Image: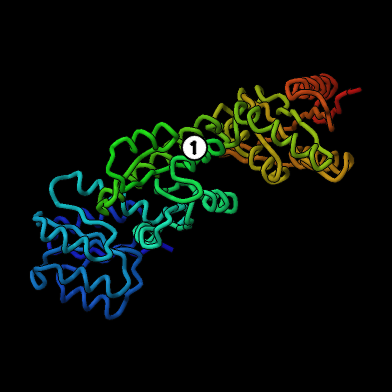
Amino acid sequence: MAEKLLVVEDSKAIARVIQKIGESLNYEVTVAGSMAELKDILEDNVDFFVATIDYSLPDAPNGEAIEYVLSHHIPGVVMTGVMDDVTRQKILAQPVIDYIPKENGQAYMYLKRILYWQRKNNKISVLVVDDSRSARLHIADLLKRRNFTVHIAENGIEALEVLEKHPSIKMVVTDLEMPEMDGIELTNEIRRRFNRDLLAIIGVSGAEYGSNTARFIKNGADDFLRKPFCPEEFYCRITQNIENLANIEQIQKVAFTDYLTELPNRRAFFQQAEGCITRYRSKQAEFCLVMMDIDFFKKVNDTYGHNAGDHVLKMLALYLRKHFGTGLIARLGGEEFAVLIEGQSKQQLCAKLNDFRKEISEKTITYEKDAINFTISIGVVFNSTELLAKQMSLADEALYFAKENGRNQIKVADTL
């Protein structure tokens, strides 16, 4: 179900722009062009996820709409063409998400970022570390306005305990001056455990001397704020660092995902497989490494076309997820796939592999007007103590044997 966006704006042209932005983000948009319309709307429906609020309306010229929307517990972003300091302070004195001056087109790009992250932030946890209760609560309140999940700690030692309990934390905002373990020590310790692509750190300090920025950054922080800071700067820094993490995650996803099947690719398989095998061995689980490919795949491409061949690869990926979804699955390239799974016994794992092979051989894949049948050959090595590269080689040799001796079969590698 789409989240609801309330647009309070007397300019029809601006309201249309904001409406288009909201709809592009899959919001259900309602527009109020005056204070009177706003009251009528909220009398019947207050179930809005967020609102954009024009500071000056014909029948509410001095920001009255802001207080009215907030009184209905609807988070609000203020859009204003009024730029003086008195108005700015009046807006920021209220618990708004942010305010945006209507200066140019960038204002609407910034609004789009806010509306996008307002929906995403509830899945992101932030840890606030400060020995001052009032400072902790202030920062936590600012973060909650932006819909983050917030955890708090009074010092560095407690912060490390919270991080252990809540691996979903993506950002730490830490003060410098704290008892037991200060912000610099905490930052250093966090960086020993978490890389920059996993967690962002923002240092905060009210100290007068200017070296704290450099100290935090040199010890692994991503950003720095000097107390007292204004909410605008705080939100800009928070959003920028969250976006940086998201961009890194997206780059890594592209780098480690097969574009066609959306399975992990060869690089991802080699990166993750060693860890999986270590876990299997530590709990003394039975496991196997599997290499498989489609029999006579060139014939599929030659007969039905490469688009049909791509469709077959996608369908095979779906069946792999269905049968081995709890394991590690990857497309190594072309029509070749790898699977790493654990089970209760060697016999159970063999049965799973054979069930998969059999289902594939009995299925007919429809593509446009064509009905396509295909089979797979499988090579497998069980519970090997060899290095990953050697296991892959053994499974590949078994796969080659299966293909040379009839195809549509499973061959277990010969191991000592």
Q: Residue at x 78, y 41 (%)?
A: 342
Q: Residue at x 20, y 48 (%)?
A: 107
Q: Residue at x 25, y 53 (%)?
A: 230
Name of the residue lying farthest toward the right: 416
Is residue 291 left or right of 241 when viewed as pictured? right
Question: Is residue 213 shown to the viewer in this render?
Answer: yes
Expressed as whole percent of the image width and height from the top left, the position of residue 313 reads 62, 33
The one of 396 and 138 positioned closer to us in this rendering: 138
Q: Would you place residue 67 above or below residue 186 in this image?
A: below
Mark 1 residue crowding within 10 angstroms, few (<14) / some (14–19) / many (20+): some
Name of the residue lying farthest toward the bottom: 43
Q: Amino acid at mark 1?
A: Asn
> How did the renderer colour the structure?
rainbow
Expressed as whole percent of the image width and height from the top left, the position of residue 289 reads 77, 31
Q: Quadrant of residue 87?
A: bottom left
Q: Quadrant of residue 146?
A: bottom left
User: Which residue is under mark 1?
Assistant: 188
Q: Residue at x 40, y 46 (%)?
A: 176
The secondary element bearing badge 1 is classed as: helix
The one of 283 and 164 positioned closer to us in this rendering: 164
Expressed as whole percent of the image width and height from the top left, the position of residue 91 reads 19, 62
Is residue 397 left or right of 194 when viewed as pictured? right
